[in-house]
Image: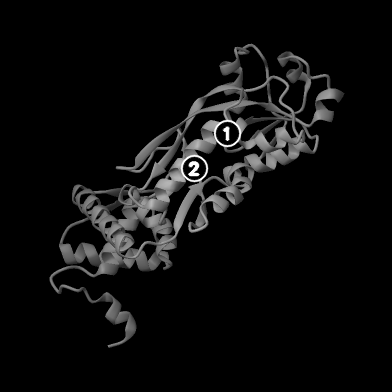
Amino acid sequence: MNQSRREEVSLNPSLPSLNALRAFEATARHASMTRAARELHVTHGAVSRQIKSLELSLGVTLLARTSRSLELTIEGSRLAEGLGAAFGLIHATINHVKPGPLILSCSSSVAMCWLIPRMPAFYRDNPGIEIKLDMNHDRIDFSRNNVGVAIRNSTVEPPRHALIRDLGVEWIGPVCAPDFAAMHGIARPADLEQASLLATETRIRAWADWCDASGQPALDLRPQHSFEHFYLMIQAAASGLGVAMIPHMLAIDDLQSRRLVAPFGFVPGPRRLFLWIAPHLGERRDIRTLEAWLTREMLDHVPA
C-alpha cells in the first residue's frame, strides 16, 4: 500500500476518511474550495475530489454548487457545525497536553507602531514568556490559526465563545509633520479643506468619522492620496506629504518625539478596542500575564 493510499484510510472503516472531513470542514468555513485548498496546502482539485468522495460515502449532497458560489445544504450545515466543534476540540486538547508558543494576533500597523516598541519592557519584566506575532486584522479561528490572544476593533466579529476584554474607546485625530502644519497654516479645522489629506484603504471613512465625532460635519474633507496600511500613511505624513487621520495609539511615539503633531488633538471615535482570548487558553499563566500587561498599557496611553 502506498503512502497516499494510507492517508485515505479512516481510523474507523465505517467512517469517511479524515482527509475528506477536513477538506469539507475547511471549505464550509471559508465558503471557498480555493481558500480551503490554500489552508490545507493541497490543490483545488484535491479538495473537490475529497468532498465528492465524502458525499458518495454519506449518500447525501453537502454542497449546492453554482457557477459563482458554494452553498451548504441542510445536511452540509449540520455536518459542518459538528466537524467545526470536533476539530476545535482536538486542537484545544493538544494545546492543553503540549502548550504551544503564545501567539498574539494584531494588525501590522498596531504591531509596528504600538506593540513592538513596547515589547522590550514586557520581556524585561517577564523574561520567561515569548510572544509570536500573527499579522491579521480580520476574523480569526483560535484553534485553526493557533492564536491565543487578538487585538481587534469593534467592527470585527469575534469568534464564538471568545473571552472578550474591553480596552476602551479608540481615539482618533489628524496628524502631520510639524513643518507641514506651519507651512500650510493649519490652525483651525476649516484649514484642512485646503490641505493635502491622506487616507488608508483599511479605514475609508476615517475622515468622515472624525468630522462626526469632533462636531465638524459641514467640512468637505476629501483625501488626495491613499495607502494600503496605516503604517505607510503615517510614514507619508511624517515625511510631509499631508495630513493623516489615525488612531491615537498608532501615533503615541511619533507625537512624543515631535515627528508628528496633532493640531486639534484627539476625540473618541466610533470604534472600541477589544482583547479576544481563546476560551481554552484563558487560564494559562502567560495568557493572563499578557492580558494584564496589554490592558494596563492601553489604558495608560489614553490622550489627555
Q: Position of residue 138 (x, y in %)?
A: 47, 44
Work out whether 181 lies above or below 281. Answer: above
How many angstroms separate mark 2 from mark 1 (CA)?
27 Å
Q: Is residue 220 left or right of residue 287?
A: right
Q: Which residue is mark 1?
A: 203
Work out whether 254 lies above or below 42. Answer: above
Give the label, 2 or 1, closer to the camera. Answer: 2
Rendered residue at 30%/51% (across/down): 280
Residue 185 in view, yes or no: yes
Residue 66 in view, yes or no: no
Q: Which residue is mark 2?
A: 293
Q: Position of residue 13 (x, y in %)?
A: 15, 74
Look at the numbered disc 1 and give the secondary structure of its residue: loop
Q: Determine crowd level at label 2: few under 14, some 14-19, many 20+ residues with C-alpha closer than 10 A.
A: few
Look at the numbered disc 2 and give the secondary structure of its residue: helix
Mark 2 or mark 1, earlier in chain: 1
